[in-house]
Image: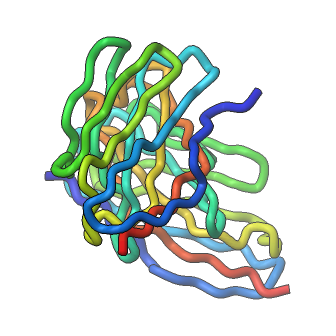
Amino acid sequence: NAGVTQTPKFQVLKTGQSMTLQCAQDMNHNSMYWYRQDPGMGLRLIYYSASEGTTDKGEVPNGYNVSRLNKREFSLRLESAAPSQTSVYFCASSEAPSGSSYEQYFGPGTRLTVT
Amino acid sequence: KQEVTQIPAALSVPEGENLVLNCSFTDSAIYNLQWFRQDPGKGLTSLLLIQSSQREQTSGRLNASLDKSSGRSTLYIAASQPGDSATYLCVTGGGGADGLTFGKGTHLIIQP
């Protein structure tokens, strides 16, 4: 059981380049999330998808777009990368949206550096 | 807006000690509280989930308590081991898919 997988694990981009971070879960979860983690700060929600076919902005959505491709996959796209987007990105999934008793399961993260 | 504070930010103790990690939150209207472990360069692993109607949860050497009225949770680790070295995150669930609030974590080092 792979759980939540993310690709790539590491990426270096130049300012202005674009890229897509991929996330997939094999637990048949309804909800998926993208977070970023920066030194000295807690994880912050970028975008989430409460169920297949829906996406919503989180706390820090500027500069990002998402696609819920199907129930398993949720991708995060940086259209024009900026140094401020240097961070560790985590994808997570849960059986239901948070606020219920359901746990969130996290992927291993993508370490992105924008130069 | 919910704020989650974890004290201490860092802790280093000898192997074998029992220890307590503290978490406080400003809005008591939470649905649940979750403790995660994060190893360096890795993702988050869920340790314990306490629903709002519960007072505590236990898993092996770990015990987490929740006092909603005072806005506090503690994670108790018994007989600590070097393998317990990690960052421990406290996370409140406030309702809705965007309702999670993360603390900044306690960085724990268990000295052999």
Is B47 positioned to the left or the right of A35 in the image?
right
Is A14 positioned to the left or the right of A27 in the image?
left
Q: Tell me the residue at 38%/24% (across/down).
A: A100
* Residue sitting nearer the eye, A100 or A87: A87
Q: How is the image coloured?
A: rainbow
The picture places residue B25, in percent across and down from the top left corner, at 29, 57
User: Compared with residue B104, is residue B47 higher up or lower down, i.e. above or below?
Assistant: above
**How many numbered marks, from 0 up?**
0
The picture places residue A30, in percent across and down from the top left corner, at 44, 16
For residue B33, what is the image quadrant? top left
Q: Tell me the residue at 20%/51% (across/down).
A: A63
For residue A57, what is the image quadrant? top left
The picture places residue B98, in percent across and down from the top left corner, at 26, 36
Q: Tell me the residue at 34%/62% (across/down).
A: B24
User: Compared with residue A31, is residue A15 higher up or lower down, i.e. above or below?
Assistant: below
User: Compared with residue B39, is residue A54 higher up or lower down, i.e. above or below?
Assistant: above
Is B60 positioned to the left or the right of B109 in the image?
right
User: Compared with residue A88, is residue B47 higher up or lower down, i.e. above or below?
Assistant: above
* Residue sitting nearer the eye, B63 or B35: B35
* Residue sitting nearer the eye, A90 or B12: A90
Q: Tell me the residue at 29%/67% (across/down).
A: A15
The picture places residue B106, in percent across and down from the top left corner, at 51, 73
The C terminus of chain B is located in which quarter? bottom right
